[in-house]
Image (cartoon, rainbow, N blue to C red):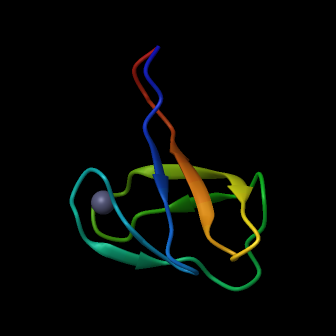
Amino acid sequence: MDEVQIKSNGNNYVCDECKNENTISEEKKIKDIVECEFCGIEYTLIDQDESENFTLEMLEEEK
Ligand SMILES: [Zn+2]
């Protein structure tokens, strides 16, 4: 299956679905789930690099 992954810029990321910018709250960490406040798509924080940019993976609802 195709997993959609996006990178954040610090605590900000652009939703792949609706292209709006969201902010990841400070207390979020790896394995936490964040939700786009515009379209409701959820992402899992799967990684964080040395520059504190997160990798987010979209949670697919369809199988
Ligand atoms: Zn969205």
Residue 46's spot in the image, x, y percent?
69, 48
Quarter residue 28 falls in: bottom right
Residue 31's spot in the image, x, y percent?
77, 51
Q: Is residue 60 above or below residue 44?
A: above
From the viewer's perspective, is 49 left or right of 9? right
Q: Is residue 32 above or below residue 29?
A: above
Going 37% across and 57% down the picture, which residue do you hit?
A: 40
Going 51% across and 68% down the picture, which residue do you hit?
A: 8
Q: In this view, does 25 lie above or below 53?
A: below
Residue 12's spot in the image, x, y percent?
47, 79
Q: Which residue lies furthest to the left in this view?
A: 18
Residue 18's spot in the image, x, y percent?
21, 58
From the viewer's perspective, is 39 left or right of 42? left
| Residue nearest the viewer, comparing 58 with 5 | 5
Going 32% across and 76% down the picture, which residue do you hit?
A: 21
| Residue nearest the viewer, comparing 53 with 38 | 53
Q: Quadrant of ligand 1?
A: bottom left
| Residue nearest the viewer, comparing 2 with 61 | 2
Q: Which residue lies furthest to the bottom in this view?
A: 26
Going 31% across and 52% down the picture, which residue do you hit?
A: 16
Quarter residue 26 falls in: bottom right
Count of number-bearing discs = 0
From the viewer's perspective, is 47 left or right of 56? right
